[in-house]
Image (cartoon, rainbow, N blue to C red):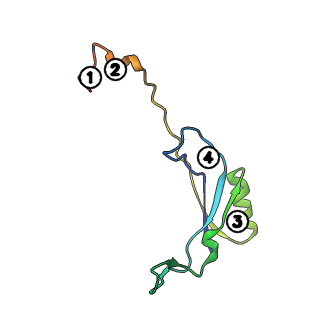
Amino acid sequence: MSAKIYRPAKTAMQSGKAKTHLWILEFDQDVPRTIDPMMGYTSSADTRQQVKLSFESAELAVAYAERNGIEYRVIAPKDATRKAVSYSDNFRYSRLQPWTH
């Protein structure tokens, strides 16, 4: 039984940073998924794939994994770098590319 511990990034559909401060412990897939021959649904006998545990910090998630004997790997978050952009720069005289619609 192994798991990954990560902090989710914000989705492209949201402008805020809601639900990105929590750390998630998510179990890896142990049993491969199978396709039901009649209906074509994908299923698995491993129910731990459906479990996502959230923690306030990475240390709490690591402590939980060690306490329960779960092999884990921590994936470090990549913080977004914000580029300062000004609307008036679109009309700057020294612009490298022409401004067109």
Q: Earlier in the sequence, mark 1 or mark 3?
A: 3
Q: Amino acid at mark 2?
A: Asn
User: Which of the numbered marks, if any, corresponds to residue 99?
Assistant: 1
* Rendered residue at 65%/45% (across/down): 21
* Residue that numbered label 3 is attached to: 65
**Residue at position x 28%, y 19% in the image:** 95
**Disc number lying in front (1 or 3):** 1
Q: Nearer the viewer, residue 36 or 28?
A: 36
Q: Quadrant of the C terminus?
A: top left
Question: What residue did someone put label 2 on?
Answer: 90
Q: Are marks 1 and 2 in contact (CB under 8 Å)?
A: yes
Residue extending furthest top? 93
Q: Label 3 to label 2, Cα distance in Å?
A: 51 Å
Q: Nearer the viewer, mark 4 or mark 2?
A: 2
- Quarter of the image for residue 60 reads bottom right
Q: Nearer the viewer, mark 3 or mark 4?
A: 4
Question: Which residue is depicted at the point 70% across and 65% down?
Answer: 65
